[in-house]
Amino acid sequence: RGAMLDEVRRTAHDSRTTRTKRAAYDRALEALRGLLGREPSRAELAQTMDISDAELLAIEASGVRLTPIDDAYDETSLAFASDDPDPFEALCAAEDRDRLLEAMVQLPDRLKLVLQLFFVEELNLTEIAAVLEVSVPRVHQLRAKALKDLRALMEGD
């Protein structure tokens, strides 16, 4: 427990005094909001805390941390990551899709139907067996053969 507290203190940007003043500020702000039913003015807050306007300003400013953009910016940071796909990856995906379509055309109709029912229509093997009027193990064999043939056709290019 002591080591954890030491680590928190070591990495904290504020001194203990600053954190104490900030906590008192937050308590006074909440108390005045509850009492007045509105956002208190700076003068009301300073009067409640029994401090000057300059001290109040210093407490409010203590919560603000300015970080140089060079420290915050990192090209690998997720905050700066783009949702747009990498152009090279998009090109590769398009080429792979085209190769897959070319390979699919070369498959027999029955194997194409099995793949369509499984991957596009998202039917399970039992449902595909009912459509094709074959057993579930046979559907499994057909699907395995279709995938094996597709892989061979795509690797053959």
Image: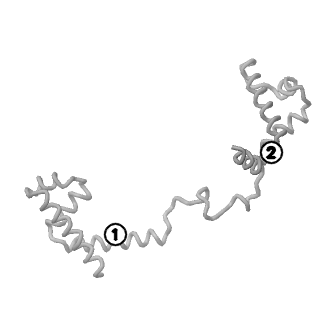
Question: Which residue occupies 76% across, 27% down?
Answer: 27
**Residue annotated with mark 2:** 14
User: Residue at the left extreme?
Assistant: 133
Q: Label 2 amino acid?
A: Asp
Residue 80 image-quadrant placement: bottom right
Whole-angstrom CA distance, mark 2 to mark 1, is: 55 Å
User: Residue at the front extreme?
Assistant: 2
Is residue 6 depicted above or below 135 in this figure? above
Work out which quarter of the rendered image holds the N terminus and state it: top right
Give the image location of residue 108, x and y in percent.
Answer: 15, 71
Is residue 72 depicted above or below 88 in this figure? above
How many circles with numbers are drawn on the protein? 2
User: Residue at the top extreme?
Assistant: 35
Q: Is residue 81 left or right of residue 47?
A: left
Question: Which of the two labelled residues, at mark 2 and mark 1, occupies the earlier sequence position?
Answer: 2
Give the image location of residue 45, x and y in percent.
Answer: 83, 26
Q: Is residue 10 left or right of residue 150?
A: right
Q: Label 1 amino acid?
A: Arg
Q: Is residue 81 left or right of residue 130?
A: right
Question: Residue 97 bears which disc, if any?
Answer: 1
Helix, strand, or loop for circle 2?
A: loop
Circles 2 and 1, Cβ within 8 Å, touching? The answer is no
Report the colour scheme.
one colour
